[in-house]
Image: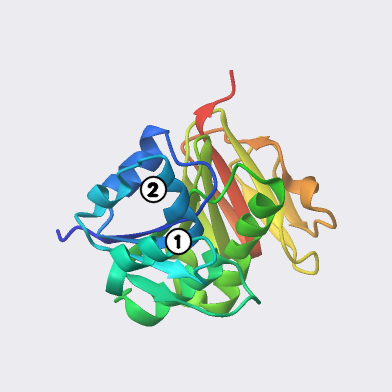
């Protein structure tokens, strides 16, 4: 069986340290690095380029890159001169416009930490990306050092384990959400605040979520 292609977008939050996140970076076929992330990782001498065997580009408006950095990057630097969207969105747009996505998974790394406003905005972009490119919704995930974010548009089943902590964040309160396989089941409920679907837990080896633009968070480890 052919191994699925794996594209990583690397943002400028906390650099991943958990084995799950580092494995995603190590096994990536291609890395798209936000320019602010590139500057930060270069300053910390983080040799992330080696993970993708040199298959990477750096995308952004260049405000975080020195002239020397841009010279060293050469054609690997993709300049996007607009300020309506952050670098994560620019990187995702470049992926959609330039890489073959058939059979590919897309993982967002370094999207949390450092600044809480960036963290909230970046997590919410999962719903934005699923709205813009619905065909990619099931291919998207965001990994942190503690767990995994993904997006539900319709019905989706998840592999799990007893005691895994699960939170749901309904980005559109007009759409009802149903859940099975969790400690606190939900049937056709409209969540009117982001916190209302949080802090649940899996009871077995899988659970399902039915809804539109529902962000799902799963921890790597069970609650102690």
Query: In percent of the image, x 64 and y 50: which residue is there?
Result: 119
Where residue 203 sits, quadrant-wise, is top right
Separation of residues labelled 2 and 1 (CA atoms): 11 Å
Give coordinates of residue 184: x percent, y percent.
71, 38
Residue under label 1, please give it: 66
Residue at the right extreme? Answer: 192
Query: In percent of the image, x 61 and y 47: which residue is there?
Result: 180
Give coordinates of residue 219: x percent, y percent.
54, 36
Task: Identify the mark at residue 42; answer none if there is no mark.
Answer: 2
Horizontal arrangement in the rendering, residue 153 relative to residue 176 (left or right): left
Which quadrant holds the C terminus?
top right
Q: Nearer the viewer, residue 82 or 123?
A: 82
Give coordinates of residue 208: x percent, y percent.
55, 51
Horizontal arrangement in the rendering, residue 53 relative to residue 109 (left or right): left
Q: Secondary structure at mark 2?
A: helix
Above-or-below relation of 27 to 72: above
Query: In percent of the image, x 61 and y 40: which residue is there?
Result: 166
Q: How is the image coloured?
A: rainbow
Nearer the N terminus, badge 2 or badge 1? 2
Above-or-below relation of 88 to 95: above
């Amino acid at each position: 069986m052919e191994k699925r292609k794996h594209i990583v977008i690397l943002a400028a939050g906390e650099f991943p340290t958990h084995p799950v996140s580092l494995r995603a970076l190590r096994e990536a076929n291609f890395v798209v690095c936000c320019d602010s992330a590139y500057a930060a990782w270069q300053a910390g001498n983080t040799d992330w380029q080696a993970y993708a065997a040199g298959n990477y580009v750096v995308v952004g408006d260049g405000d975080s890159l020195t002239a020397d950095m841009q010279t060293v990057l050469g054609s690997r630097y993709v300049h996007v001169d607009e300020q309506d969207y952050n670098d994560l969105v620019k990187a995702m747009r470049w992926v959609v416009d330039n890489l073959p996505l058939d059979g590919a998974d897309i993982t967002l790394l370094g999207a949390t930490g450092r600044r809480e406003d960036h963290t909230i905005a970046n997590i919410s972009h999962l719903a934005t990306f699923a709205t813009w490119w619905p065909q990619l919704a099931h291919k998207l995930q965001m990994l942190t050092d503690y767990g995994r974010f993904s997006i539900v548009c319709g019905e989706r089943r998840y592999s799990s384990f007893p005691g895994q902590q699960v939170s749901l964040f309904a980005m559109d309160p007009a759409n009802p959400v149903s859940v099975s396989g969790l400690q606190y089941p939900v049937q056709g409920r409209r969540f009117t605040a982001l916190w209302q679907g949080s802090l649940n837990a899996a009871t077995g080896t899988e659970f399902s979520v039915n809804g539109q633009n529902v962000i799902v968070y799963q921890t790597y480890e069970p609650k102690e």
